[in-house]
Image: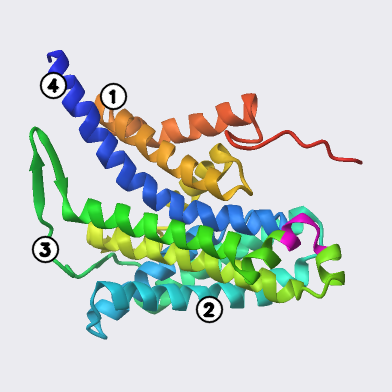
Amino acid sequence: MDMGSLLHQFIQQMINGISLGSIYALIALGYTMIYGIIKLINFAHGDIYMVGAYLGFIATTYLGFGFLPAIIFAMLGAGLAGIIIERVAYRPMRNAPRIAILITAIGVSFFLEYTMMLIASPQPRTFPAIFEATVYHLGPLVVNSQQILILVSALVLMVALSYIVNKTKAGMAMRAVSFDADAAQLMGINVDKTISLTFALGSALAAAGGVLVGIYYNSIDPLMGMMPGMKAFIAAVLGGIGIIPGAMAGGLILGVVEALVSGFISSTFRDAASFAILILILLYKPTGLLGKNVREKV
């Protein structure tokens, strides 16, 4: 293979990786927002992504919604699910030991997976084709409209989240609670309401990722959130968990790395590459690419 062909293949895999990484980034944002507020690794977050995919399936198959109404429906439904999960499962455990909260998160994950199996059956469902995928040839490169849709949707949602967090009163409250929940409460901020809003926003973003994956791969199942949820966690750690730009950067980097490994080595090693990145980042920069070392008094 000559140098020109290698370059074209490299760029093609980069395009594929950016599309995949956009999905990881949407899910990772939920991880990093929740950790930033209450220092909780919500391992049920990948299953919220699965719930969002099924809500999108219901909206398109049974309600006849198009893309935009379906994704809004899924985001609202998953946001409500996030609020309920926080209220029922996590709020009573807020002052419990970390290991108890972690076990609770794993329990919520299994509850969502097997409840969905009971409701929708374990069999994969075919996601309806909302629109025809148009293929664009840019010289030797191939880009389809679904990849463009995923990237544009992810960017719009990321910009909207950044605006909410940095420019609104709700975002100011979230940042205050993240910095010091007790001081924020003394200043009149409703901490419980702020944490619920954080869960709602994170869950809505994960649901959007689920709908986009359903459209792209045309298949959903109750266990579809397990591996993407783990990958999104790796992306959040890679960028610096608790840091919103870090989650975005980590998701895109992870997606590109996976695509390059699949294209130039073997798709068999794609998952191994992700977990190798996690090991390396924990060994050499545990605060993540955009994180800073913070001394903690004990």
Chain-order first, disc 4 or disc 2: 4
In screen coordinates, is 267 left or right of 185? Answer: left
Secondary structure found at label 3: loop
In screen coordinates, is 71 left or right of 201? Answer: left
Q: Image height check: is 192 above or below 4?
A: below
Pair 4/2: label in front: 4
Chain-order first, disc 3 or disc 1: 3
Mark-to-mark CA distance, 2 and 3? 31 Å
Q: Residue 273: give x, y in percent of width and height.
A: 42, 30
Q: Which of the pair 11/106 is nearer the observer? A: 11
Q: Residue 137: give x, y in percent of width and height.
A: 8, 42
Mark-to-mark CA distance, 1 and 4? 16 Å
Residue 72 occupies quadrant: bottom left
Q: Amino acid at mark 2?
A: Leu
Count every numbered label the image shows and give the total.
4
- Marks 3 and 1 in Cβ contact (< 8 Å): no
- Crowding at mark 2 (Cα within 10 Å: few <14, some 14-19, many 20+): some
- Which range of residues does the magenta coloring cover? 176-181
The numbered dot on residue 265 is 1
Mark-to-mark CA distance, 3 and 1? 31 Å
Chain-order first, disc 1 or disc 4: 4
Mark-to-mark CA distance, 1 and 2? 42 Å
Q: Which residue is mark 3?
A: 132
